[in-house]
Amino acid sequence: MSARLLFALCLALTWTSVLMQDLCTEGASDGYKVRLSIKTALGDHAYEWNESEMFLFKANLAYAMRRHFNMQTYNVSNIIVCDETPRVSFWFVVANPADTSQLIPGGEVEEAVRKSRNRINNAFLLTDQTLQFLGIAPTLATTVIPNTPPWLIAFIVVICVVSAGILALLVSTFMKKIRKEKGVLEEEKLENVYENGIPRDGPEGKAGSLNGGFMEDERHTQL
Protein backbone atom coordinates (compact mmCIF):
# COMPACT_ATOMS: atom_id res chain seq x y z
CA MET A 1 0.00 0.00 0.00
CA SER A 2 2.76 2.41 0.91
CA ALA A 3 4.66 1.54 -2.27
CA ARG A 4 1.61 2.34 -4.39
CA LEU A 5 1.12 5.60 -2.53
CA LEU A 6 4.74 6.57 -3.09
CA PHE A 7 4.47 5.66 -6.78
CA ALA A 8 1.31 7.73 -7.14
CA LEU A 9 2.93 10.67 -5.43
CA CYS A 10 5.98 10.57 -7.71
CA LEU A 11 3.72 10.26 -10.74
CA ALA A 12 1.69 13.29 -9.61
CA LEU A 13 4.81 15.37 -9.06
CA THR A 14 6.18 14.38 -12.46
CA TRP A 15 2.89 15.19 -14.16
CA THR A 16 2.73 18.54 -12.38
CA SER A 17 6.28 19.38 -13.51
CA VAL A 18 5.39 18.52 -17.10
CA LEU A 19 2.27 20.67 -16.97
CA MET A 20 4.21 23.59 -15.46
CA GLN A 21 6.93 23.25 -18.07
CA ASP A 22 4.30 23.54 -20.79
CA LEU A 23 3.39 26.95 -19.39
CA CYS A 24 6.76 28.33 -20.54
CA THR A 25 7.04 28.88 -24.27
CA GLU A 26 9.03 31.28 -26.39
CA GLY A 27 7.11 34.51 -26.78
CA ALA A 28 4.70 33.77 -23.91
CA SER A 29 2.61 36.82 -23.10
CA ASP A 30 3.47 36.63 -19.41
CA GLY A 31 7.08 35.59 -19.97
CA TYR A 32 10.35 37.45 -20.51
CA LYS A 33 13.55 36.64 -22.33
CA VAL A 34 16.82 36.99 -20.47
CA ARG A 35 20.17 37.51 -22.17
CA LEU A 36 23.49 37.44 -20.27
CA SER A 37 26.80 38.74 -21.66
CA ILE A 38 29.15 37.26 -19.07
CA LYS A 39 32.27 37.21 -21.26
CA THR A 40 31.71 40.80 -22.36
CA ALA A 41 31.31 41.99 -18.78
CA LEU A 42 34.05 40.01 -17.04
CA GLY A 43 36.54 39.14 -19.79
CA ASP A 44 39.16 36.67 -18.52
CA HIS A 45 37.34 36.44 -15.19
CA ALA A 46 34.10 35.24 -16.78
CA TYR A 47 32.47 32.25 -15.09
CA GLU A 48 30.74 29.32 -16.76
CA TRP A 49 26.98 29.30 -16.91
CA ASN A 50 25.69 26.01 -15.53
CA GLU A 51 22.86 24.48 -13.51
CA SER A 52 24.12 26.10 -10.32
CA GLU A 53 24.02 29.54 -11.93
CA MET A 54 20.51 28.84 -13.21
CA PHE A 55 19.45 27.81 -9.70
CA LEU A 56 20.87 31.11 -8.41
CA PHE A 57 18.87 32.98 -11.06
CA LYS A 58 15.66 31.22 -10.03
CA ALA A 59 16.39 31.90 -6.37
CA ASN A 60 16.88 35.60 -7.09
CA LEU A 61 13.62 35.72 -9.06
CA ALA A 62 11.80 33.95 -6.24
CA TYR A 63 13.25 36.53 -3.81
CA ALA A 64 12.08 39.36 -6.09
CA MET A 65 8.56 37.91 -6.21
CA ARG A 66 8.46 37.48 -2.42
CA ARG A 67 9.62 41.04 -1.94
CA HIS A 68 7.10 42.42 -4.43
CA PHE A 69 4.07 40.59 -3.01
CA ASN A 70 5.39 40.47 0.56
CA MET A 71 4.68 36.74 0.58
CA GLN A 72 6.87 33.82 1.64
CA THR A 73 5.24 31.27 -0.70
CA TYR A 74 7.43 31.79 -3.79
CA ASN A 75 10.17 29.20 -4.35
CA VAL A 76 12.55 28.27 -7.13
CA SER A 77 9.96 25.73 -8.34
CA ASN A 78 7.67 28.63 -9.26
CA ILE A 79 10.25 30.03 -11.71
CA ILE A 80 9.90 28.10 -14.95
CA VAL A 81 12.65 28.38 -17.59
CA CYS A 82 12.58 27.25 -21.21
CA ASP A 83 14.33 27.69 -24.57
CA GLU A 84 17.76 27.98 -22.99
CA THR A 85 20.62 28.54 -25.46
CA PRO A 86 24.39 27.99 -25.07
CA ARG A 87 24.98 31.73 -25.56
CA VAL A 88 23.15 32.15 -22.25
CA SER A 89 19.69 33.29 -23.14
CA PHE A 90 16.36 31.83 -22.08
CA TRP A 91 12.71 32.55 -21.42
CA PHE A 92 11.06 32.39 -18.03
CA VAL A 93 7.60 32.65 -16.52
CA VAL A 94 6.42 32.64 -12.90
CA ALA A 95 3.78 30.16 -11.76
CA ASN A 96 1.24 31.17 -9.17
CA PRO A 97 2.08 29.41 -5.85
CA ALA A 98 -1.63 29.05 -5.05
CA ASP A 99 -2.36 27.44 -8.43
CA THR A 100 0.66 26.27 -10.39
CA SER A 101 -1.43 25.91 -13.53
CA GLN A 102 -1.79 29.68 -13.65
CA LEU A 103 0.91 32.23 -14.40
CA ILE A 104 1.60 35.49 -12.61
CA PRO A 105 0.75 38.36 -15.02
CA GLY A 106 3.75 39.78 -16.85
CA GLY A 107 3.16 43.26 -15.46
CA GLU A 108 3.55 41.98 -11.89
CA VAL A 109 6.72 40.10 -12.84
CA GLU A 110 8.11 43.25 -14.42
CA GLU A 111 7.47 45.29 -11.28
CA ALA A 112 9.09 42.61 -9.14
CA VAL A 113 12.19 42.54 -11.35
CA ARG A 114 12.48 46.32 -11.38
CA LYS A 115 12.31 46.51 -7.59
CA SER A 116 15.12 43.97 -7.16
CA ARG A 117 17.11 44.69 -10.33
CA ASN A 118 20.27 45.78 -8.53
CA ARG A 119 20.23 42.71 -6.27
CA ILE A 120 19.86 40.42 -9.28
CA ASN A 121 22.65 42.19 -11.18
CA ASN A 122 25.00 42.06 -8.20
CA ALA A 123 24.40 38.33 -7.76
CA PHE A 124 25.94 37.73 -11.20
CA LEU A 125 28.46 40.62 -11.18
CA LEU A 126 26.64 42.15 -14.15
CA THR A 127 24.78 45.35 -15.05
CA ASP A 128 21.55 46.28 -16.82
CA GLN A 129 23.52 46.22 -20.09
CA THR A 130 25.03 42.75 -19.60
CA LEU A 131 22.07 41.10 -17.85
CA GLN A 132 19.12 42.09 -19.99
CA PHE A 133 15.46 41.37 -19.32
CA LEU A 134 14.11 42.01 -22.79
CA GLY A 135 10.89 43.97 -22.53
CA ILE A 136 11.78 45.42 -19.10
CA ALA A 137 13.38 48.86 -19.28
CA PRO A 138 16.73 49.25 -17.49
CA THR A 139 16.53 50.84 -14.08
CA LEU A 140 17.79 54.36 -13.74
CA ALA A 141 20.81 54.92 -11.51
CA THR A 142 19.80 56.12 -8.09
CA THR A 143 20.44 59.82 -7.69
CA VAL A 144 23.09 60.43 -5.08
CA ILE A 145 21.86 63.01 -2.59
CA PRO A 146 24.77 64.75 -0.87
CA ASN A 147 24.69 65.03 2.91
CA THR A 148 25.06 68.81 2.57
CA PRO A 149 22.45 70.50 0.30
CA PRO A 150 23.97 72.39 -2.67
CA TRP A 151 22.25 75.64 -1.66
CA LEU A 152 23.95 75.48 1.73
CA ILE A 153 27.35 74.95 0.11
CA ALA A 154 26.76 77.97 -2.16
CA PHE A 155 25.61 80.07 0.82
CA ILE A 156 28.74 79.17 2.80
CA VAL A 157 30.97 80.08 -0.15
CA VAL A 158 29.26 83.48 -0.55
CA ILE A 159 29.55 84.18 3.19
CA CYS A 160 33.26 83.29 3.11
CA VAL A 161 33.89 85.60 0.14
CA VAL A 162 31.99 88.49 1.76
CA SER A 163 33.77 87.95 5.08
CA ALA A 164 37.15 87.92 3.33
CA GLY A 165 36.26 91.19 1.57
CA ILE A 166 35.19 92.87 4.82
CA LEU A 167 38.35 91.67 6.57
CA ALA A 168 40.54 92.97 3.74
CA LEU A 169 38.76 96.36 3.90
CA LEU A 170 39.25 96.59 7.67
CA VAL A 171 42.92 95.71 7.40
CA SER A 172 43.43 98.24 4.61
CA THR A 173 41.68 100.97 6.63
CA PHE A 174 43.74 100.14 9.71
CA MET A 175 47.01 100.27 7.74
CA LYS A 176 46.07 103.64 6.23
CA LYS A 177 45.34 104.99 9.72
CA ILE A 178 48.72 103.75 10.97
CA ARG A 179 50.51 105.39 8.05
CA LYS A 180 48.62 108.64 8.62
CA GLU A 181 49.49 108.72 12.32
CA LYS A 182 53.10 107.95 11.50
CA GLY A 183 53.16 110.85 9.02
CA VAL A 184 51.75 113.25 11.65
CA LEU A 185 54.44 112.22 14.11
CA GLU A 186 57.15 112.80 11.50
CA GLU A 187 55.80 116.27 10.78
CA GLU A 188 55.74 117.16 14.48
CA LYS A 189 59.30 115.94 14.82
CA LEU A 190 60.43 118.12 11.92
CA GLU A 191 58.68 121.13 13.43
CA ASN A 192 60.62 120.60 16.63
CA VAL A 193 63.90 120.36 14.71
CA TYR A 194 63.34 123.47 12.59
CA GLU A 195 62.34 126.78 14.13
CA ASN A 196 62.04 129.89 11.92
CA GLY A 197 63.82 128.06 9.15
CA ILE A 198 67.02 127.59 11.24
CA PRO A 199 67.98 124.03 12.12
CA ARG A 200 68.53 123.35 15.82
CA ASP A 201 70.98 120.58 16.54
CA GLY A 202 72.10 121.76 20.01
CA PRO A 203 73.34 124.78 21.94
CA GLU A 204 76.36 125.19 19.68
CA GLY A 205 74.34 124.90 16.48
CA LYS A 206 74.92 122.43 13.70
CA ALA A 207 78.53 121.43 13.13
CA GLY A 208 80.17 123.59 10.43
CA SER A 209 77.71 126.55 10.80
CA LEU A 210 78.51 130.02 12.11
CA ASN A 211 77.19 131.38 15.41
CA GLY A 212 75.33 134.60 14.67
CA GLY A 213 75.79 136.09 18.17
CA PHE A 214 79.55 135.59 18.14
CA MET A 215 79.96 137.31 14.78
CA GLU A 216 78.00 140.36 16.03
CA ASP A 217 80.24 140.74 19.11
CA GLU A 218 83.36 140.46 17.02
CA ARG A 219 82.17 143.21 14.67
CA HIS A 220 81.63 145.68 17.58
CA THR A 221 85.04 144.86 18.99
CA GLN A 222 86.72 145.82 15.75
CA LEU A 223 84.97 149.17 15.71
Image (cartoon, rainbow, N blue to C red):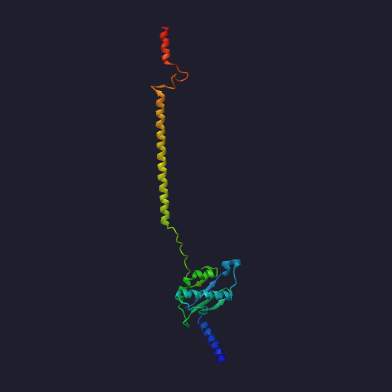
Q: Position of residue 24 (x, y in %)?
A: 51, 80
Q: Quadrant of the N terminus?
A: bottom right
Q: Residue furthest left?
A: 196
Q: Is residue 122 visible?
A: yes
Q: Position of residue 22 (x, y in %)?
A: 52, 83
Q: Residue furthest front?
A: 203
Q: Is residue 193 positioned above or below 221 on the image?
A: below
Q: Is residue 138 positioned above or below 180 on the image?
A: below
Q: Quadrant of the C terminus?
A: top left
Left or right, residue 13 beside residue 185 = right
Q: How many marks?
A: 0
Give me the residue at 42% from left, 8% from top: 221
Q: Residue furthest top?
A: 223
Give me the residue at 41% from left, 32% from top: 183
Q: Residue furthest bottom?
A: 1
Q: Position of residue 200 (x, y in %)?
A: 42, 22
Q: Quadrant of residue 217?
A: top left
Q: Is residue 192 positioned above or below 114 on the image?
A: above
Q: Is residue 179 positioned above or below 143 on the image?
A: above
Give me the residue at 49% from left, 70% from top: 117
Q: Is residue 136 visible?
A: no
Q: Position of residue 204 (x, y in %)?
A: 45, 18
